[in-house]
Amino acid sequence: MSNIEPQGSHRIHRPDTHALLSSRVSVFGERGEKLFTKKRRPSLLLNVVGLTLTVVGIGIAISGVVDAIDGGPDVAALLITGIITSIVGAIMWQRTVAPKQIRVLDVFTTVTLAWVTIAAVGAIPYLVTGHFTRVDDALFEAMSGFTTTGATVTPDIEATSKGLLFWRSMTQWMGGMGVIVLVVAVLPTVGSGGMSLLEAEAPGPTGDRLTPRVRETARRLWGVYVGFTLLMAAAYFAAGMSMYDAVSHSFTTVSTGGFSPYQGSFGHFESALLEWICIVGMLLAGGSFTLYWRALRGNVKPLLRSTEFHVYLAFVGAVALWAFVTSGNNGGQPTGFRDALFTAASTVTTTGYVATEYGLWSQTAQSLLLIALPLGAMAGSTAGGIKLLRVMAVSSFAHREALKHLHPKLVRPVRVGNASLSDDVAGKVVGFLMLALVIFGGGSFAIAATGPDLITSFSASATALGNVGPGLGLLDHTGDFTVIPPTGRWIATLQMLLGRLEIYPVILALSVVTLRIPKRVLPRRRSR
């Protein structure tokens, strides 16, 4: 609106609401200010948590509709829970606004508490429907869903209503989407400090913006995610799944979550065609969504020339070949190549689907699966784990340090493919990997102290921290986390959160309470 007035006219002071209505209004507002109310309380935490709960409530209500279509018993419980959650979230979001000044620590704290909140709220449907009677079991299932881990404490999956199982699958789809959208989209819109989470994720394509506007970048990544989901649902349906199964499995394939409405997981269908479709879907979900967008726009070279992409595919192929060759050795049960490839793709991408009895493979074959459990796929994907890009960076760093023993004055950058990493970034990656190893080892022995054997405990720690789901020992294709005592499951629940949020946000959020870091030592960022 022009500020130039006709000569002789009188200036009229209009309320801000009039100016708002006369301009182009977005549902989300420019930064959330002046939306529906003139005064909103500055609170980054309540604003983000409120918007997140609104979305979660809608998901719960949709699950209630699915149960109503099926004629299930949980319609009222799911619908009422979803509506109440959405109303509470909408009020929180509508009454608050992101403050102008945001500390980097505020961003990490908000993300951590938002994830804890949605896990707690996501556990409510399991309790109000009577699926679980213990709060810790419901929280474990919800945290496993939102973090796309896929571990379960549901002993009889097929006895559960379709509406609640649909919610179970939707938590994983929301969680997989959350890693991209919450980190790449929501945080940068409330402050430039939000991009620090991308730096913690991994150095490389995850930190790149597809456009100068971060919000536009988020929309494009969202479009790839939703389009991929629709494509997988259509492929599953065309290959013989029911519409319900196709949508449920598309949610958990694209998010690399692995929940299935059947006790036998993906092996329930006993279909080679469906398994091949799933293999392709898991491999694609383990790739970088940023590179996919560029490929869809006609710029395929970054994807084809990505060293990480080549290493990723080679790693899956190597694990599959190793399992195929060694599964029958030492008294194990031999497996076909499709089963070996399916298990390798499911493990490396941290999806966690089960299509074969890999617990009957030889110890040699299972040992490689244990190593692959926490590694993960590409940075910028929905997969969990420490990511192959970090492994490549640490390998290059170690190679350089080894050469320095021979040539002390050697000047050589840490390289990942054709990209060079600064010593500062390389140091962060090494620090992250060491911290992950400490959490993995400490978690393993802590779980073992609750009763399980070492193989089960080590795999429980690896599968929880890597957000994979299935494990080895008592957690193989026939088991679930009910074999782990409640105390051990609490440890695994914390590890799932640490693994999905890349450790640092959780630790920094805890420091707010335990260390009480003074504000003067923390940088502040102005929101854009």
Image (spheres, grey):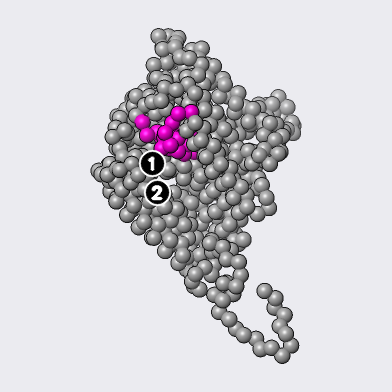
Q: Is residue 447 above or below residue 36?
A: above
Outermost residue, bottom side = 8
| Residue 394 appears anywhere in the view | no
Which span of residues is magenta-colored? 239-262
Q: Residue at x 51, y 32 (%)?
A: 235
Residue nearer the viewer, 377 or 278: 278
- Chain-order first, disc 1 or disc 2: 2
Name the quarter where the N terminus is drawn. bottom right
Neighbourhood count class around disc 2 (C-alpha, 10 Å): few under 14, some 14–19, many 20 upward: many
Q: Which three-letter amino acid code belongs to the residue tagged 2?
A: Ile
Q: Residue at x 58, y 42 (%)?
A: 224
Rendering coords of residue 501 (x, y %): 49, 44
Residue nearer the viewer, 128 or 163: 163
Residue at the disc numbered 2: 62
Contact between marks 1 and 2 (CB within 8 A): the answer is yes
Instruction: Answer whether residue 249 is magenta in the image.
Output: yes
Q: Which three-letter amino acid code belongs to the residue tagged 1?
A: Phe
Q: Residue at x 68, y 31 (%)?
A: 304
Name the quarter where the C terminus is drawn. bottom right
| Residue 452 appears anywhere in the view | yes
Rendering coords of residue 120 (x, y %): 36, 49
Rendering coords of residue 367 (x, y %): 46, 20
Q: Is residue 339 above or below residue 191?
A: above
Give the SS element for disc 1: helix
